Structures are given as structure tokens and as C-alpha cells.
Amino acid sequence: MASKGSSGREYLKYAGVGFEFAAMVGVFAYFGYKADEWWGWEPWGLMAGTGIGLIGGIYLLAREGEKMMKDLDKPRKPDSGDPC
């Protein structure tokens, strides 16, 4: 849940990270599949491409998660219109 005074907008900028992860794995798996077709490495190109995509995707998730945690830990100025 969002802490008091924070809006859902802070979380929306990180909502696309999962799609970026899936796209990264998919693109590298596709390149590995094409490498299999080109050089006849079946199934090693697909496996290597998927592995590289997974490693890159996990790195992306970790980096974005760390950035999100730093953003959420920043002290916030109280709203001037809040009577509480």
C-alpha cells in the first residue's frame, strides 16, 4: 500500500518494467533462434539467447528496483493544503 501522502503516480512509472523484462528475454531468444537457423547450432543458440536475455532482464529489474527504493526513501515535503 502507498504511504500516507503518496499517490499511485509514483508507482506507475515503474509499471512497465515487467514488460521490458519480457521484451528483453523475447528479443534475445529470437536472435538465438535465428542464430540456430543460420549456423545450425540447434538448440544452443536459442538457449544462449534466452540466458543472455534473462541475465539482462534480471539486471534491469534489480537496477530499477534499487532506483525505486531510493526514490521512495527520499524525504517528502508535507502538503501545504493538508489540515492534519
Image: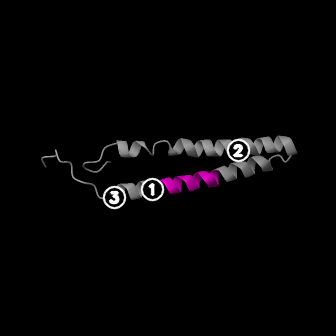
The part of the chain drawn in magenta is 54-65
How many numbered circles does the render carry? 3
Asked whether, in this view, residue 40 is left or right of residue 11, the answer is right
- Pick the front one: 54 or 10: 10
For label 3, count other residues whose C-alpha is less than 10 Å away and answer few (under 14), some (14-19) or many (20+).
few
Q: Amino acid at mark 2?
A: Ala
Q: Measured along the vertical axis of the image, is residue 42 above or below residue 63?
A: above
The structure residue drawn at horizontal position 52% and vertical position 56%, both measured from the top left corner, is 62
Earlier sequence position, callout 3 versus callout 1? 1
The structure residue drawn at horizontal position 85% and vertical position 48%, both measured from the top left corner, is 41
Residue 4, x across and y down, in percent: 25, 50
Find residue 74 and name its label. Answer: 3
Q: Measured along the vertical axis of the image, is residue 65 above or below residue 31?
A: below
Residue 54, x across and y down, in percent: 63, 51
Residue 75, x across and y down, in percent: 29, 58
- Pick the front one: 1 or 69: 69
Q: Are marks 3 and 1 in contact (CB under 8 Å)?
A: no
Residue that badge 1 annotates: 67
Q: Amino acid at mark 1?
A: Lys
Helix, strand, or loop for circle 2?
A: helix
Helix, strand, or loop for circle 1?
A: helix
**Residue that extends furthest to the right in the rendered view of this protein:** 40
Residue 7, x across and y down, in percent: 31, 44
Q: Amino acid at mark 3?
A: Lys
For label 1, count other residues whose C-alpha is less than 10 Å away and answer few (under 14), some (14-19) or many (20+).
few
Residue that badge 2 annotates: 29
Find residue 25 and name its label. Answer: none
The structure residue drawn at horizontal position 68% and vertical position 53%, both measured from the top left corner, is 52
Distance (Cα) linking label 3 and label 2: 38 Å
